[in-house]
Image (tube, grey):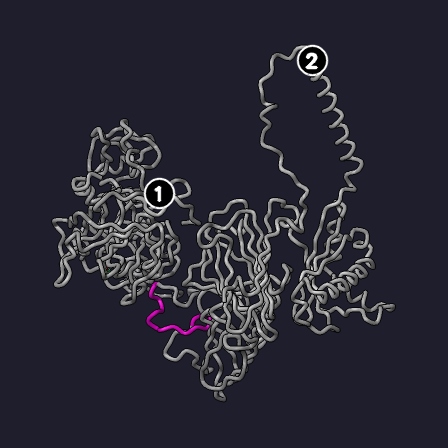
Amino acid sequence: MDYMDSGMRYTPKPDKDWDTSVQFLPASDTKKLEKKKGPGRIGAVVGVVVFAAVLSLMTGLLVWHFHYRKDVREKRMYTGSMRITNQVFEQAYENSNSTEFKALAKQVAEQLKTIYSKTPQLAKYYVGSTVEAFSEGVVAYYLSEFKVPVGQAAAVDSAMASMDKLVDKAQRTAHRPGNALVFEDVVSSGVSSVFISCFTIYFYDYTQHTRANHIGTITSPGFPNTPYPPNTYIQWQLRADPGYVIKLDFDTFNLEEDCKNDFVKLYDSLVAIESRAMEEICGYYSPSDPLSFLSSRNVMLVTLVTSEKGNYPGIRAHVSQVQKGGAGMKCGGKIIGPQGAFMSPNFPNYYPPNTECEWKIEVPAGKWISVIFSKFLLFEPGQNGKDCTKDYVAVNSKKLCGEKVGQVAETVSSNVATIRFVSDRSFVDRGFNATFKAIDSLDPCPKMFQCKNQLCMDLKLKCDGWNDCGDMSDELNCKCNESDLQCKNGLCKPMFWQCDGVNDCGDNTDELNCGCKADQFLCLNSACVLKKKRCDGRDDCGDGSDELDCGRTTSTPCNDVTYKCKNQMCINKQNPECDGTTDCADGSDEENCDCGQRLLRFKGSRIVGGQEAEQGEFPWQVSLHVKAYGHVCGASVISRRWLVTAAHCVQDDGKIKFSQPRTWEAHLGVHTQRMPGKAVVKLGLKQVIPHPYYNAYTYDNDIALMELASDVAFSDYIQPICLPAAQHVFPSGTTVSITGWGATREGGSAASVLQKAQVRIINGTVCNRLMSNQITSRMLCAGILSGGVDACQGDSGGPLSSLASPASEGGRSFLAGVVSWGDGCARRNKPGIYSTVTKFRGWIKEKTGV
Ligand code: 4AZ
């Protein structure tokens, strides 16, 4: 059954509960703007009258401000809930139009009035209360309004903050009628001024009662066809049957990155009480990183608040009910044995609020217990992760909280332990998963190294240059062996990390005197010249590189490192093309610069170790499909007509004629494979031009061009990447992006959604050593030498994109490389190898005119 048919109420109430008396001024009054003739006598009289009117108005305003303003009152709203202990829940209480609802709501409102009337700070300013809803328990959700003089707000806030005490006090006093309601668990919180004073807000309110075996759906307005509207507050009040809790699974979550503007906030309540807030979420979450929440009781409130700027696709979530304490929510118990595992309820998704679990662990007598948390995420806003006053895990009496990076180990010096997990009424996180094992107290890490944080590490990992323990304790007090580099701070690092453009030691000692002495300058041709010879007007390096970027851009004799303008003049500036400054006298360095920019705005900015790209984030990325087979290789758009890919993608094999244009279909504007969105353009090819010197054994010159059968129209999702000039330099250590739908791990399967990752350019000499002398000057190395991030099978032919300056500052992306080959994927000390595009700039121009 459709969610809309199943009792969901759709009540767009523009400003129903809020101040509607505001009117917008007309932008202009055309009549008043009509040109009049000269002023004359009438004009002078009118001028005097207007002047007098303005003067008296200002006097009046000043008198009002100083005399009466202290009486000006502001509206303050408080929302809260309380349990009515002497009532039994009736189904009719769910329906705010029923007589039962109205009768009980009236009684609650009357008792609230009595309670407020007994507190002087509140009685004077009280306007009224409404009951918003009832839920099982019986829990009443109310809204109280006050009109408070400016300056008294803090006193009212503080009185309302101890609403539970006010209610207690009122209930203890005598003269209560026999049928008075008894309130418990009273909570209250102020309603954000955004909702009270922001008169442009549109208010939507939906309610839904989930039934057994039914999955409802909630979506932001306009989803999936249009972005959600600006200046909107939407709330979904969700209910489940008694004994059940609400399960909320987002399959799409795409909001503005800054929670100050747009956010979703979930409450373990039917109204937005701050102390019952479960999570505030904004930005983008990929469907592969699902967001799933559980309430603690049979109610949940989902709110979506948007600011004046819209333009994001929005949310879709599925709502169902699961039995309280049922599968996925179970936790605690006794675990006996030499090892075992336990985790927070609903792990790896968010645990419910207001939950307690206790595990009793027992290992064989005489042994100790080592507990290892491989994931530990118990973050609470405003908490420092030390005092553990809110959500925590306690290993015996030791409390752990906050979010921990890497593994956490705790040793218990006994064969029994009690582990308690407590989540309080507000804010939830993804929780933890843990294993435990029996250990020998005398030898806790047999044949292994014990880190300071009690983790056990393979002995081979000690002093290998990697922080395996997470606290560096495996890299301290090391005697470096001969193949290692001794950092000044005492660490040892593999020798080949020296001079790779990355500060591996932490104190930069691995990047000092790289090929040159301290007083020398490293030329682009690797020669060293005295630093004082830099920018002295003479070519000391021999390749002219000591005379580049010497302040003012000037004409200079042409050589291998200078940029050649269209008029054949050369200039002494590195990478001048499309940088927003005209450097060539003929302006040619800023010509043909309609490239390398994404049209959509993004937050900052599989590939192995990457994450999902956003739609339109890499609009030059192409998916090359072999007809009836699917995605095979990547490519990059360089113009309306031409693509760049890898030559090894277009070599015939026994069965498929990869060299033939008709074999291929280029898919442009793709984000998710097999989901042909409106942005996707599929085009056949007119010709395929592999590099004539491609070597299938060494992968030298691994580049090819593809001409599309017709011009492609550029869009938000299809844009060309800039081609770097032949002299463009991408220095070692530069962070660059790799993208593709290739395998997400070595030997793994292809990604469905375009993946992105950041890697760094690695010094060619270092790379050649790591890759057993297989690197030619037409190859460029990039990766993360600690492993874990890399291009992989299926990414071949795709771009290695280098952003010249931040995209937010108008920076453009240049095609630094084409994914070519590697020794497996994401292995330690095995970077990915890319074809060096600068080496092929002339050939590309010759074949394509681009
Ligand atoms: C491939 O087979 C491939 N790790 C591409 C890149 C890399 C490895 C393999 C780099 O297409």
Callout 2 crowding tier (Cα within 10 Å): few <14, some 14–19, many ≥20: few
Tag 2: amino acid: Ile
Q: Is residue 203 above or below residue 179?
A: above
Residue located farthest toward the top when viewing the structure as drawn = 40
Q: Position of residue 539 (x, y in %)?
A: 22, 34
Q: Which residue: 66% across, 54% down?
A: 191
Q: How far apart are marks 2 and 1 (CA)?
A: 60 Å
Q: Which of 441 and 355 is in front in this view?
A: 355
Of mark 2 and mark 1, the one earlier in the sequence is 2
The percent position of residue 159, horizontal first and vertical second, equals 76, 57
Q: Is mark 1 on a helix, strand or loop?
A: loop
The reply to whether the C-beta atoms of the residues labelled 2 and 1 are less than 8 Å apart is: no
Q: Where is residue 158 in the image (x, y as percent from the top left)?
A: 73, 56
Q: Nearer the viewer, mark 2 or mark 1?
A: 2
Residue designated by label 2: 42
Residue 58 drawn above or below residue 416: above
* Magenta stretch bounds: 451-465
Q: Name the residue under label 1.
A: 597
State the residue in front, 436 or 330. Answer: 330
In front: 38, or 816? 38
Identity of the residue drawn at 51% across and 85% down: 362
Q: In which quarter of the image is residue 530?
A: top left
Q: Is residue 39 among what the camera can see?
A: yes
